Amino acid sequence: MRTGATEVLAVLQQRGVDVCFANPGTTELDIVRALEAQPAMRCVLGLQENVCTGAADGYGRMTGTPALTLLHLGPGFANGIANLHNARRAHTPIINLIGDHMSWHLAFDAPLTSDIESLARPVSGWVRRMTGAADAVAAAAEAVDRAHDNGGQGVTLIFPADYQAEKMDAVETAAAKAEAAHPASTVSGATQTAARTISTPPPRADVDVNTCADRLRAAGKIVFLLGGGGETSGLGERAQRAAARLCDALGATAYAETFPARAARGGGLPDFDRLPYFPEPARAVLDAADLIVLAGAPTPITYFGYDGHPSQLVENDRVLVLGSAGDDIAAPLEALAQVLDAPAYLPRSHDIPEVDDGALSPAGIAATVARLLPANAIVSVEGGTCGYPFYAASAGAARHTTLTNTGGAIGQGLPVALGAAVACPDRRVIALLSDGSTQYTIQTLWTLAHEALPVVVLIAANHQYGILRNELKRGGQTLGERAAGLTSLDRPRIDWVELAHAYGVDATSVETTGELAAAMTRALDRPGPTLIAMQL
């Protein structure tokens, strides 16, 4: 039987949306039933909505195409907003499908009634409430297009339960209706294979390469700031090579933005470190520059407001913009390298620091993971304890992709690893995480086990909120007893091995770099997920 729900799913499937990260409830049951008619759409159950939205973020970052999230009313959607916030900062295409009460029931203000539109707008570039089954079909087709706007964004469809169940016998087929309103495109694709082909954005038409070259020639000290994203972003392979050529020709330096959505790393690429997080070292990089070239990165802003530091770290008259998130950044950088007669790029060789087989340290963990990293791996990084040291050490690793927390809402790293593993089953995924932030979405472990995904989860177990303690001690301030208590995870200590076992994930605890190397080697040989608790 054709219903609003079956036709919406058919349209989404036809237009390349073939993965659904779901945590459904009563108002989504007709969608759940309709999934029976879409066997090609992979359904992945998350035990909490923020797992689903974070997984959709990881999937979209790696494929450039939207996954579907299926969420329950306003409260369920609200549980997933934190990772939708991160996804918005990453410019990730996502389609959120939210069931709502029967349209005729909303006026009675039942306990789960809420203003879903108001919840959705801050994390959605486009919001649509369905007004009937036929409208729902058209909205689903448009949602795929809108998800690709603005360099990639989240869109939200609100689907009242009575319209999900509404019979469609008198309505034209979903395929015909979708095709008439939104002809098939290379972005959405007509098959699963086409859906996972990342479209290359066209170069920006308003970049005058000769004018930009003149400004570069006239500048003294130049800093390139490269933004992350897809293959043609500022942190794709082509753009990094072109930026290195320009640095050689101009005597310039280059940095990655502080928290890139996606960055190619290692395997002979240049060693462009991330712009520092705190304002003092960031200003040490930026203040002396005559010109900051934004190559897909936003204007650098301090993460928080700090007394004595401007919020915007670079004045507009010192900025040259080559493109924004979602733009083809590789093309203008390569064109500039040609105009400026920059030397050819030669692959760089970077050493990974040697470490002793002793007690674990952030530097030792970073070097060990970088040395053992398989070629073409994906590393989801969350947490400063090991994240920054790993990014530095990973320049000497095999070629890989790094994903970081773009929006600062914690609990992102583990779900993003889940989504990346679903998106790229032929690539090994490593989640390099901190113990405090991982607890926000710890339910992801169950889904990793349920889906038998080969993700290696590395937990830096220092039993504290380290970033907060660093902030509290800024400027030589003392960490008081109350502050220490509110940032401690030590009483009781979380037993990560037992916790992982409870979720069905193989796990072990290590205390030395030698133990870590042995445990990671074993984990990389296993077919399913493994958690390694790194005791610091």
Image (cartoon, helix red, strand yellow):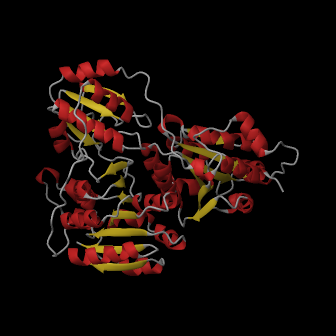
Answer with left or right where residue 132 lies relative to residue 388.
Answer: right
Q: Residue at x 55, y 50 (%)?
A: 196
Q: Position of residue 471 (x, y in %)?
A: 22, 53
Above or below 120: residue 295: above
Q: Is there any visible trace of residue 301 in the rendered image?
A: no
* Residue closest to the eye, 525 or 178: 525
Which quarter shows the N terminus?
bottom right
Above or below 123: residue 501: below
Which quarter shows the C terminus?
bottom left
* Residue closest to the eye, 398 or 70: 398
Q: Residue at x 20, y 72 (%)?
A: 360
Toward which corner of the image does residue 283 lie, by quadrant? top left
Q: Residue at x 54, y 70 (%)?
A: 451
Q: Is there any visible trace of residue 472 in the rendered image?
A: yes
Q: Position of residue 207 (x, y in %)?
A: 38, 23
* Residue closest to the eye, 266 or 156: 266
Answer with left or right where residue 266 lies relative to residue 191.
Answer: left
